[in-house]
Image (cartoon, rainbow, N blue to C red):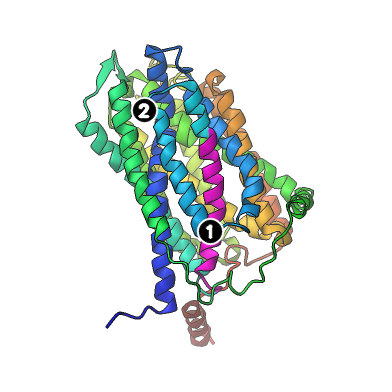
Amino acid sequence: MLLQLTPRRHELISVFMVSIGTTFMFLGYDVQSMMAESVLHSVSTRNPDRISEYAGYYGQAIQYISFAFFSLFTATIQYYISSKSMLVLSSILFTTCYIAYIHVNSYIFYSSQLLLGFAYAMYNSAEGTYLSEHSSRRTIDSNSALETGLGHTSLFFGGVTMLFVFHFVPHTFDGHFLNFDEHVVQVIYFSLMALTIVSVVLFTFLPTKQFDSIALNTPRVTPSVVAQFKRFGESFTHLNTSLLIFTYVYMGCMVSFMYGIYPTSLSFTSETASDVYIIALYLLSSGAAAFLSAMFIRPMIKRLHKYKLIVPMAVHAISMAIVLVLVYCSVPNEATQKPTSNMNVLITPSRYLSIVIGFLLGFADFTITMTRSVICQIAVPDYRAEIFSLTRIYQCVASCLILFISPYLTVTSWILILIIGLLAGNAAMFTVLCRTHNTTVAAPIEPLEEEKDEKFQEEKTFA
């Protein structure tokens, strides 16, 4: 006799499949983001006519601006295409983008980054919709936590993948610096493509049946494109939205530093460039921090009541402050621009130091992302979906601009930008938090029944 699935088990299977699919899809995405400038700089050194030496920075900038642009339309697209279909299509586009590395040239590479931005925007809209279709108001919080925790393992498994690839693929050096020849580049990106195909398969077989879901119990009204843009305009003029611009511009700079600038500096510094595993270990430590934060830090913070947003903001600020001090003391000033043998630093860079920095950046990334998820729900409650889209647009435009000028920014410049952004972003977030006067801001979703029962028992005990 076949096992009859309860609605809750059906939800868990759906959430688990979309989470694992997300892990495989972003596994390759995270790796290519961190290695793009190092790989393409190496290709450009041998064949300067094929692609710019800063194509890694420029490609990410194009991808971010593409994401920001298409984010204006993906919210409307999901009214006409199912969330499952959007997830499948986005994973297919993620997979095909790796073809650009088979024979690197400017036209194919920049076109693939444009397509990747569209795929990311489509996934971003479809993920939340699919979760709402397979979660009730009672289970959305726990399902989101599960999806966040599993989804954040992509960095960790990306690091594991790169350890295997660099262990078995022969590599050569140009002096102290790792030389990514044509064969090595193809092996790396074919491996990532093969792993991303797993996400296509998983998304294809996602369950579609709904039970007592949020989406099923919410009236579905298909707005016109004009109405959508009108709502964007109304949400844009709100004071809280204006204040949060500082926070999300800072997030754009911070994410660019974490995924592009610092990993590139490891490849451009003679002391660390000869360590073929250093970027893989950096990935591993960032992923481990994000996963541990999702599994342990988030539940702890949920118990802090009215301090639920203040604590992650403070943790983020402390983590970033330590990172900036370590980077200033250990990274040569020109290492974000070009390969350098100048080791005029206070602390000798090493594998172990990059692991510490990676862990702290993963921790900082998770805490500010969690804070963003919450503040979007309370900043302008009547325009939650629009606020979330706008914040991603702010973040991506900031990333685009900072990456385009990255070839001219030294380590000192980056640290000054991040310090100013950290102070302004946290101040803006705190101001919005004070303006809401809401003591339940970190848990706007209805709690699970078992949580209610637990709270009732605690109140009964102390009565």
Q: Amino acid at mark 1?
A: Ser
Nearer-the-camera pick, 73 or 441: 73
**Quarter holding the N terminus?**
bottom left
On the image, the x and y values in percent for residue 74 come to: 61, 50
> Looking at the image, is 406 positioned above or below residue 65?
above
Residue type at numbered disc 2: Ile
Residue 134: in magenta span:
yes
Instruction: Please tell me which of labels 1 and 2 falls first in the chain.
Output: 1
Q: CA distance from mark 1 to mark 2?
A: 31 Å
Q: Is residue 412 visible?
A: yes
Q: Which residue is mark 1?
A: 83
Q: Nearer the viewer, residue 58 or 335?
A: 58
Main SS type for the magenta part?
helix
Q: Residue at x 43, y 58 (%)?
A: 18
Q: Which residues are magenta?
A: 114-137
**Percent of width and height locating residue 293:** 42, 54
Which residue is painted at 49% across and 68% down in the image?
A: 134
Q: Is residue 106 magenta?
A: no
Q: Secondary structure at mark 1?
A: helix
Instruction: Locate residue 81 relative to residue 333 in the image: left or right.
Output: right
Residue at image x 62%, y 63%?
A: 441
Residue 70: x %, y % from top left: 62, 43
- Residue beneath disc 2: 102
Picture quadrant where residue 146 is located:
bottom left
Dot 2: what SS? loop
Whole-percent x, y for residue 87 in the image: 48, 53
Extreme residue in the front direction: 80
